[in-house]
Amino acid sequence: MSHDTEQLLTQLRAIVGDAGLVTDLDAQAPYLKDWLGKWQGRVAAVVRPANTAETAEVVRLCHVTHTPIVTQGGNTGMSGGATPDDSGAQVILSTTRMNRIREVDPINNTMTVDAGVILANAQQAAQEVGRYFPLSLGAEGSCTVGGNLATNAGGIAVLRFGNMRELALGLEVVLPDGRIWNGLRALRKDNTGYDLRDLFIGSEGTLGIITGAVLKLFAQSHARATAWVGADSLEQLVELLARTRARCGERLVAFEMMSAASLALVLAQVDQTRAPLAQPTVFNALVELADTEDSGLQRMLEDVLGQALEDGLIADAMFCASQAQSAALWKLREGISQAQVRAGKVIKHDIALPISSLAPFTHAAEEAIAGSGLGGCEIINFGHLGDGNLHFNVMIALSSTYDELRHATLVLNRLVHDLVARLNGSISAEHGVGQLRRDELKHYKQPLEMELMMRIKQAFDPNLIMNPGKLV
């Protein structure tokens, strides 16, 4: 260990204490590797400040010493955005000790939280006062609000409530020089200049460290109706989505799609799961309605899907008669990530398209992959059909070498992302750019857009210490 590193550790310990500094290599291990096992690095230290003031002191010290900072929440990301490089020169700043629910205001329908609050705990805090925080995703038991904001997370309820950009009213942020911007305003309207909040949401820790947030709350839904639908084509599900929206309006909170291969993978890899329908179908949808009171939701959903069955638009449907049945269906949808990790090596594409382009894209991408010369590929296509977000993933054999995986990734990224660009889509929808899509972003963003992003980065972070090598 160099003298400079020893001095840095001494100064960091003086700020956060022994409980806030992790230097033992074994204790650091969980922070150094992403949960998918794709990236791993080394750091001088893992720093765990207990509050915003300590965070500001840590960042101020790193600013003076030009020490790069990688901010990390629950470490559940899928793009390598919270994993350090292997230089050993960076520090990880973990927000997990900053886990206070600061205030819940049911009259204003807001909640103010630390960035390190686990998403499920935020949901529970809202529920305890008769309110609802709608962000919901598979990692909600371990991901943090700060990480959700940094990647502008979406999840299964975007169709009704929007992603994190729509769910946050105000932020508290430690800037790269250690100053604290207090933007914790619980206002629906604030038209006083540039929207700094929106700059930090989705910035993946490259402009500053989010330490607190004011979140929107909603009335609790006391009635739900859930069904599983099978169809012969994606076009049919897109048409069913349009019909359901027209009939049910804002009661439609989820319309999740899984291909036959996606469902088969979950059934094979996740315990205590079973197929909802008697016969497999090419595409499946999990449809859910919700309302603050029972206004005939079950009958409404049965009417929509019954008419679709009569018209031949769908092949089959299964309606939930209990919460247990609904939970079993959601387990199928939420088990895909776990199933992929168990079954093979996955090349992930987190893309967004106009809903009208989802079926044409899928056909073209399947044809392009079939003609790519890559053998043994299995397409795992699933996602949030209601907001045009597909997780168009491709699995290759678990026995594939690093070079084979790298080659397949380069080939498939170009095929898939070229099609997405041609259809005016986005190559990153809700998982963030991180290091996974950083170089791809430069290929598909307009040069002027990249220039403007770099100008913003340099204005906020002239020493380039905030999450280097990610996003830009």
Image (cartoon, rainbow, N blue to C red):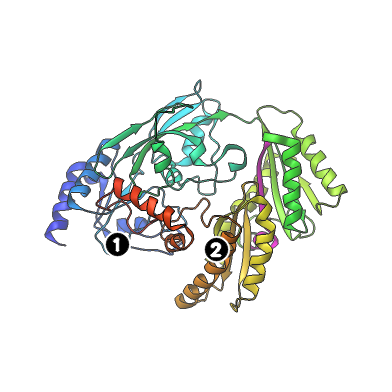
Residue closer to the observer: 187 or 449: 449
Q: Is residue 53 above or below residue 443?
A: above
Q: Is residue 54 above or below residue 284?
A: above
Residue closer to the observer: 379 or 353: 353
Element under disc 2: helix
- Look at the image and give the residue range highlighted in magenta: 252-265
Left or right: 408 as drawn, with respect to 21: right
Mark 2 crowdedness (10 Å alpha carbons): few <14, some 14-19, many ≥20: many
Mark positioned earlier in the residue sequence (1 or 2): 1
Q: Residue at x 18, y 51 (%)?
A: 65
Judge whether residue 24 is colored magenta: no
Judge whether residue 261 is colored magenta: yes
Image location (x, y in percent) of residue 354 = 63, 51
Mark seen at residue 417: 2
Q: In the rendered image, is residue 345 in sight?
A: no
Q: Amino acid at mark 1?
A: Arg
Left or right: 295 as drawn, with respect to 415: right
Q: Are marks 1 and 2 in contact (CB under 8 Å)?
A: no
Image location (x, y in percent) of residue 4 = 14, 57
Q: Quadrant of residue 263?
A: bottom right
- Residue located beneath label 1 in the image: 42
Image location (x, y in percent) of residue 57 = 22, 41
In the rendered image, which quarter contains the N terminus? bottom left
Q: How many marks?
A: 2
In the rendered image, which quarter contains the C terminus? bottom left
Q: Residue at x 57, y 55 (%)?
A: 425
Residue closer to the observer: 425 or 162: 425
